[in-house]
Amino acid sequence: MPANLTPDYLAAEAKFRAAESTEEKLEALDEMYATIPKHKGTEKLRADIKRRISKLREKEKQSSKTGKHVDLYHIERQDAGQVVLLGPPNSGKSSILAQLTSAEPEIDDYPITTREPMPGMMEFDDISIQLIDTPAISHEHFERGLTSLVRNADIVVVVLDCSNYELLDHFEDIRVELSNSRTVLVGEYAPEVDYPAGTVARRALVVANKTDLPGAVENLDVLRECYGNEFAIHPVSVETGEGIDDLRRVIFDALEIIRVYTKVPGKPPDMSRPFTLKKGSTLLDFAAIVHKDFVHNLRYARVWGKNVLEGAQIGRDHVLEDGDVVELHA
């Protein structure tokens, strides 16, 4: 079966060939794996890319043991998704991380308090989502490693101080700095665009923080007027707690994932730990992550959910919904 490699993949492959450092090679390989078409014709190529990534990461570990450079911006994705928090100085990124996770970032009133990425795990119902706080971005300060972190994330949350009258400039600073490295932030309502080869588009939403401060309401109106037709904008206040709990659901929805539970024939469903898949995933996609043998040996399945008859038998192409319980029969 032909591989039918995309222009984005070919651009990432060229970037890998030109890479000199381990960090640059890993970034290119991650892009290659993210953009390669997933079908039978690319199975060996995908396996080879994973092997090379594993080998380079092992090399990094060995280097760290001898005191050599460690890439602080390469953070392994954990659990249901990886979300990167971006923002200008003093926008409240670290405070939001502290509110939503058990992480304990350094929080102060002076600029650039966060000097390296800090991950934390946000609980949402019965799953965990990884949030990563990052150094502040401005037209004067941009950490080069942020590009690879953003390009490898599932979504981006841009945190702005809506009491600051320069918040529009702050948002543009972030977009411009990323676009300089061919990385584009795309809003929920943005039209479909064909980007040049090598450009990575990442879904983003905007969190307007500090709604409790003077001037915030007026600035929020301006922000919505300028960007509300492209980006989902969510007002919050870390100080008063306004919108913080709702932000968990907002982030979950932005990830566009579903939770699917398993059931062994003759036994109650296991509701303790769901599998997570992208929206639009089919029964066959689910069977593959439960166990690879199901891909070939699956005879049929039954499902319990909102939009089906309880225990209905479904085919391999059946599209699953969030909260479905599936009983696989091999």
Image (tube, grey):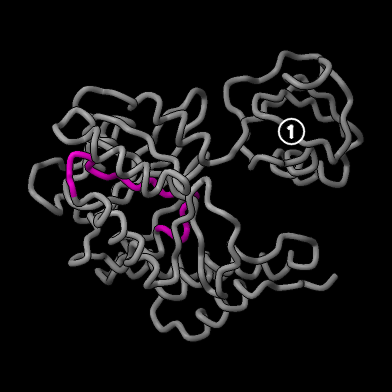
Q: Is residue 158 above or below residue 137?
A: above
Determine the image quadrant of residue 160. Answer: top left
Whether 99 is among the magenta residues is no
Whether 157 is among the magenta residues is yes
Q: Is residue 15 above or below residue 104?
A: below
Q: Quadrant of the C terminus?
A: top right
Tell me which segment is drawn in magenta: 150-165
Q: Quadrant of the N terminus?
A: bottom right
**Residue at x 24%, y 69% (from the top left corner):** 67
Nearer-the-camera pick, 164 or 56: 164
**Residue at x 57%, y 75% (from the top left corner):** 197
**Residue at x 57%, y 54% (from the top left corner):** 191
Q: Position of residue 136 (x, y in %)?
A: 22, 55
Does the image show residue 127? yes
Query: Where is mark 1, residue-wise?
Result: 320
Q: Position of residue 237 (x, y in %)?
A: 25, 29
Amino acid type at mark 1: Leu
Q: Position of residue 300 (x, y in %)?
A: 89, 32
Left or right of 90 in this view: 24: right
**Residue at x 22%, y 40% (from the top left corner):** 92
As drawn, which residue projects farthest toward the left?
Answer: 110
Q: Is residue 171 above or below residue 229?
A: below
Left or right of 198 in this view: 279: right
Q: Position of residue 154 (x, y in %)?
A: 50, 50
